[in-house]
Image: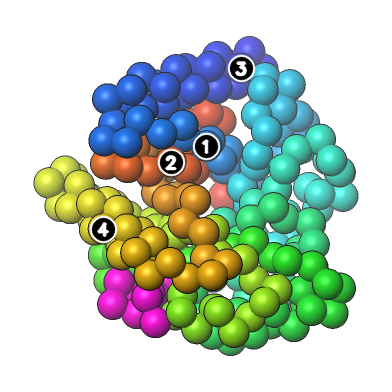
Amino acid sequence: MLYISENIQKVKEEIEEVRKRSLTGEPVELITVTKTFDVPIIEQAIDAGIKIIGENKVQELTSKIEQLNDKVIYHMIGNLQSNKVKYIYQDVALIHSLDRLSLAKEIEKRGKSTDDIVHCLVQVNIGKEKTKGGLYREEVLPFVEKMMEFPHIQIDGIMTVAPNTEDIKYLRSCFRNMVSLKEEIEREKFDRINMQYLSMGMSHDFEIAIEEGANMVRIGSKIFGNRDYSK
């Protein structure tokens, strides 16, 4: 469908425009969120220049990996159960949702078994919302320090799903809090902890996220349209 190509081009232009006026001016990585969308639609996005897709569920991710193979790079962006790590850890470039010690232990176990380094972002619940996963801000630094004990885990940054709110002032404060947290971790100069990515911002708030310092955004509906969750 032509609209997918047009939407991708529009999103990329919007990202670049916002990046120029952002606080950092850093390049911004686009993760295209493909949950619920079928492979033929994803292939159209790949043909239009999409290089990275993000999936929320392991079963859906593994199915798409089987069909798409190496046509695209895969990220696991949703909640990850420890018992499902074994199915995806060798196939994804980045796990966005590392948020608890039990999950870290399983990732380390699997990485050690095959001598793989598994790249992860630490998920932060910046709004302290009970319905969302992620560590509270004050828990993140001790958790990151604990990751020094897991040589097969590489921390590449932090991620958040910001509160869904119309209060732009509050939203900006959440994003700024994430920037502050990233800088706090960087000052510790931990070995093997690389604050390369600050992943925040989705279809409805990515412009504000980039303005405040995000260098990775996760966009789906703005590219593909509304999802059909009944399938």
- How far apart are labels 3 and 4 at the CA level? 36 Å
Q: Alpha carbon of mark 3 to alpha carbon of mark 2: how far?
A: 22 Å
* Mark toward the start of the polypeptide (4 vs 2): 4
Q: Amino acid at mark 1?
A: Glu
Mark before the other along the chain sequence, 3 or 2 = 3
C-alpha gap between disc 4 and disc 1: 20 Å
The residue lying toward the viewer, choosing from 96 and 128, is 96
Three-letter amino acid code at the position of disc 2? Asn
Nearer the N terminus, badge 4 or badge 1? 1
- Residue 1: mark: none
Q: Which residues are magenta?
A: 129-142
Q: Position of residue 114 (x, y in %)?
A: 86, 73
* Mark 3 or mark 1: whose residue is earlier in sequence: 3
Looking at the image, is 135 positioned above or below residue 155? below
Residue at 26% x, 65% y: name it: 127
Is 4 located above or below residue 29 in the figure? Answer: above
Mark 4 vs mark 1: in front:
4
Which of the 4 image quarters holds residue 210?
A: top left
- Residue 110 versus residue 130: which sits nearer the camera? 110
Which residue bears the numbered disc 1?
29
Q: Which residue is mark 4?
A: 180
Pointer 1 with pointer 2, Cβ within 8 A: yes
Give the crowd class for mark 3: few <14, some 14-19, many >=20 residues within 10 Å.
Answer: some
Q: Amino acid at mark 4?
A: Ser
Cβ atoms under marks 4 and 2 closer than 8 Å: no
Q: Is residue 151 above or below residue 63?
A: below
Q: Residue at x 53, y 36 (%)?
A: 30
Q: Nearer the viewer, mark 3 or mark 2?
A: 2
